[in-house]
Image (spheres, rainbow, N blue to C red):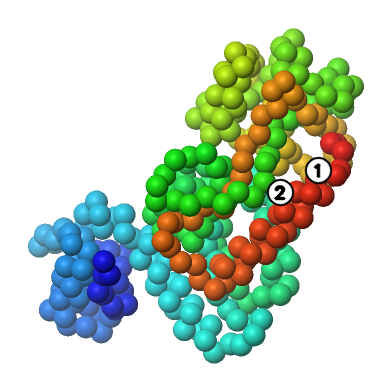
Amino acid sequence: MSINCEILDLRAFLSVVELENFHRSAEALNLSQPALSRRIQKLELAIGAPLLERTTRHVSTTALGAELIPLVRRMLEEFDTSLFAVRDVGSQRSGLVTIACLPTAAFYFLPTVIKQFSAEYPNIRFRILDLPATDGLQAVARGEVEFGINIMGFSDPDLIFERLIEDPFVLAARKDHPLAAKSELEWDDLAPYQLITVHRSSGNRTLLDAALAKSNLKLRWSYEVTHLSTSLGLVEAGLGISVLPKLATPQEEHPFLVTRPIGNPQISRTIGIVRRRGGTLSPAAERFMTMLIGTWAEGNRATERKPGW
């Protein structure tokens, strides 16, 4: 079923939301108040539910209206960007790419791809929401972003996942730690040492605990933190060892730290691209996603050939 509404209907809705007043919104849009009200009513009729709650002095959004705001903002911004983009030709086309990305991927991998992409398409802008797994999925589902880079394994019929890489969990330790002398480890090898882990609300922690439980294993931790980067800081300070995804570790030689693979069992997280089912991407996002898939695949092959640091 198609929804019949116009760009000005969306602008009217967003203006009333931001100004919280029909009179000021009508002036800002150069409309009469009755015309503005008709625009809102038309949009509500197309959606099939009220979007605004009106009183004599105040205007607020309904629950559905609040949920619609980030999607409308993105639609209008992409529309405005496209108007300017049609004036450009070839590789100089402008555009906007909006993505939600795991913080580890955003920090260690994404800049390389964006740099390569921007050299070819210098007028395309990026809005990157570096969010934990659950928040990133919600941003995709709500339409706040065009696609996401996230942990696969979440079940949502409205989302489509496309696998990119397997990201194994590894040990991170100081170079002078006893475990650094071993080339490979098993989970039982970690037991005598103080362990630094991320909080149980983390998607990484949930995945790791569930996988270990299948082998009747459980990690006993001494320090629990919110961010993976914090755990690396504590490891560097000599407070213990940490288990974290390899992508969350520095990808080049580090002066103090090393990583080691852990087996029996080997546990990894699958990272992929997540999109809304039935959703469409802007031309800029399509081009970037194609480059992202190709570059990530090549980078993953190079990482597999390179020994751990």
Q: Quadrant of the N terminus?
A: bottom left
In the rendered image, the vertical position of residue 265 relative to residue 49, given as above or below: above
The quadrant in which residue 216 appears is top right
As shown in the figure, which amino acid type bears the numbered disc 1?
A: Glu
Q: Quadrant of the C terminus?
A: top right
Spatial distance from mark 2 to mark 1, Cα to Cα?
A: 16 Å
Front-most of residues 297 and 132: 297
Q: Is residue 231 visible?
A: no
The numbered dot on residue 108 is: 2
Q: Is residue 87 visible?
A: yes
Q: Residue at x 61, y 70 (%)?
A: 287
Q: Is residue 162 left or right of residue 116?
A: left
Local SS, label 1: helix
As shown in the figure, which amino acid type bears the numbered disc 2?
A: Tyr
Q: How many marks?
A: 2
Residue carrying label 1: 304
Residue 93 screen position, x and y as percent: 60, 81
Q: Is residue 81 left or right of residue 92?
A: left
Q: Residue lying farthest top?
A: 192
Residue 4 screen position, x and y as percent: 25, 74
Q: Residues within 10 Å of mark 1 (few under 14, many from 20)?
A: few
The numbered dot on residue 255 is: none
Q: Residue at x 67, y 46 (%)?
A: 165
In the rendered image, the vertical position of residue 61 relative to residue 285, given as above or below: above
Sequence-wise first label, 2 or 1: 2
